[in-house]
């Protein structure tokens, strides 16, 4: 079955071109159909250079939700925005998934409004993939839920675990709980309670992990609340950039060091490729009755292509059904009444 | 007046030698007296190679609080541990400050037990200095208080602000609140409430800052709860190490790149010096009736020396009196009853 993706062409920091090229790269690589939503002129002009847009359609939309807008207000008011129209298509089953590099809050708001949650999931969230010394690690939540309860983190573990198996091919992913000490008693009140939940479950929970474990590659899924996760995401991005800037400043101070850098340049290029988020595509919204992937506002066409492929992998592998099944499984494993609290949406 | 520092020689990951050498470097550089506490044999053997330990004394202690011990239990039971004896000396005004690279929880517990809090401070905390593209930035709290209220973060802003002026020479430091969006309405419930407190105060509050701003150098003090701060501290440490490891792995893959690295090597050394936490010495415990500085468990003698100098700078500049004065000042600037809530220790 050809997977059909709706791609929001508006809202990227780099303009519609980068997104459209991402769609072209995706249909060349996989058996996909992509419907691009946004300003028709911009999309057609970006497509003009390509001879093979056979599996690409355009749905023109007249409104754009900007990065600064309040998600809920914008989604309610801008009925002809690319984001809202995309989720309407998904709701009507005219497409299988939505990919957007726009306002991620608005994407989540539209997804909640038009798709709703998977039965039993209290809070959908956003998962993100980090490069590590050994391989990728999934962190969830990275921004959708800033104030969480233990049940929410517990369900993030379930959803991120399915995501890691489906898109990274990790069998029975090792789940760690982000804290500030390895013992179960360490951390804030939220983390200490979540630790007990996870320990009692049938999930492959390896215990607390610390910030420095994130990049070691000894854990496949790191669970945290959306405030902490988003701080970590942006801190990592900022630190990686600052380190490379400082290193280049030092290198440019002497002629010899600059010569050295030129010789070692390919190593820097390879390194950048290794840590480039574009390689991992976008961040999926998990826990929804449908599939949506948000991409970084500065996504290159490569990142958009990979974001589309991530969405397709989630569809192809029935990720949402697997989340429902795992939710039932681990709930049956708990016999102390906690699942009902979770299902009550607390 | 010669400042007199008590240095806990036990508990460092690198053994007593590194600490003792740090003390020697400190007394050579500044008008200081250092009393080293710990195993007499180890300290004397480390001092043996130095001809100038004139301002260095030894107070032998028989017990050690390890990194794994429960801080409160250990401090209550191990009366002859280097940490407890050091704080006893400080309580009796026989020394002016305590510096330790041991169990930082135990240092905080001993400080709370023997010194108590500055009047009006609800929760003492730990401040840490980060290198950025432009200059150092102070983050507080980085681990002492995992569950905080807005009043606590508000007081961290006051304390870290005094610390930044005293030790980094920053006049009227720019204070930022760590959040996941720049607008005041962004962030979790704790951050949103704290934002309102800070905005109404007479402090130099520049608004919310995001994780990626941490390393840009556009803010002097970053305020957060101890859970988030400690995650950030360890994540940064882990990421910086991972980036250098990956870069070196890529470089070692080709002979040409390795040659290049050799030529650019000094730039890497300079870079490391620039981001080395050892350059900034230790992290002060702020908000106590007394002065204490904790150093990283893997502190080099240079880091210990700088930790001692940070403690001396806090004493020389009457940091605690300035914290009290600023606390009074900003409280007088608030007229809606919040100060009483703070003083009640909520």
Image: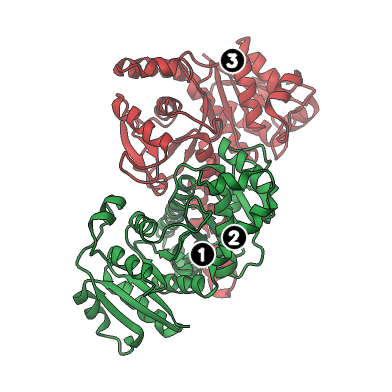
Chain colours: A red, B green
Between circles 3 and 1, the one closer to the viewer is 3
Which residue occupies 35% across, 40% down? A208
Q: Secondary structure at mark 2?
A: helix
Percent across and percent down for residue A84 are: 69, 20
Q: Which residue is mark 2?
A: B161
Q: Do circles 3 and 1 both sit on a common chain?
A: yes
Percent across and percent down for residue A2 are: 54, 16
At label 3, counting other C-alpha atoms closer than 10 Å, the crowd grade (few under 14, some 14-19, many 20 or more) is some
Q: Which residue is mark 3?
A: A115
Q: Secondary structure at mark 1?
A: helix
Which residue occupies 51% across, 57% down? B119
In this picture, residue A203 sits left or right of residue B97: left
Q: Nearer the viewer, residue A299 or B10?
A: B10
**In the rendered image, is residue A242 in sight?**
yes
On what subunit does the disc labeled 3 rest?
A
Q: Secondary structure at mark 3?
A: loop
Q: Which residue is mark 1?
A: A263
At label 2, counting other C-alpha atoms closer than 10 Å, the crowd grade (few under 14, some 14-19, many 20 or more) is many
On what subunit does the disc labeled 1 rest?
A
């Amino acid at each position: 079955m050809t997977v059909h993706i709706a791609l929001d062409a508006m809202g990227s920091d780099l303009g519609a071109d980068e997104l459209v090229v991402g769609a072209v790269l995706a249909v060349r690589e996989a058996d996909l159909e992509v419907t691009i939503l946004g300003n028709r002129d911009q999309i057609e002009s970006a497509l003009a250079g390509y001879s093979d847009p056979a599996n690409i359609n355009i749905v023109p939309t007249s409104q754009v939700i900007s990065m600064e807008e309040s998600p809920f207000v914008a989604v309610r008011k801008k009925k002809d925005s690319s984001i809202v129209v995309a989720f309407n298509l998904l709701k009507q089953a005219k497409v299988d998934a939505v990919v957007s590099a726009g306002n991620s809050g608005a994407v989540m708001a539209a997804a909640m409004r038009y798709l709703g949650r998977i039965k039993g999931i209290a809070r959908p969230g956003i998962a993100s993939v980090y490069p590590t010394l050994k391989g990728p690690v999934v962190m969830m939540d990275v921004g959708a839920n800033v104030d969480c309860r233990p049940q929410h983190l517990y369900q993030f573990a379930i959803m991120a675990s399915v995501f890691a198996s489906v898109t990274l091919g990790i069998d029975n992913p090792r789940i760690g709980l982000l804290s500030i000490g390895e013992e179960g008693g360490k951390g804030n009140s939220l983390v200490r309670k979540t630790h007990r939940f996870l320990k009692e479950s049938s999930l492959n929970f390896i215990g607390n992990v610390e910030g420095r474990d994130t990049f070691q590659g000894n854990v496949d899924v790191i669970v945290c609340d959306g405030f902490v996760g988003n701080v970590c995401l942006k801190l990592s991005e900022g630190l990686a950039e600052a380190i490379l800037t400082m290193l280049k400043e030092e290198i440019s101070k002497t002629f010899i060091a600059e010569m050295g850098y030129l010789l070692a340049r390919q190593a820097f290029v390879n390194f950048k490729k290794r840590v480039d988020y574009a390689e991992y595509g976008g961040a999926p919204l998990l826990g929804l009755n449908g599939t949506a992937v948000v991409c970084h506002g500065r996504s290159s066409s490569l990142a958009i292509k990979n974001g589309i492929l991530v969405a397709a992998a989630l569809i192809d592998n029935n990720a949402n059904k697997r989340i429902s099944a795992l939710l039932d499984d681990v709930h049956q494993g708990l016999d102390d009444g906690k699942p009902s609290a979770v299902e009550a949406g607390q």
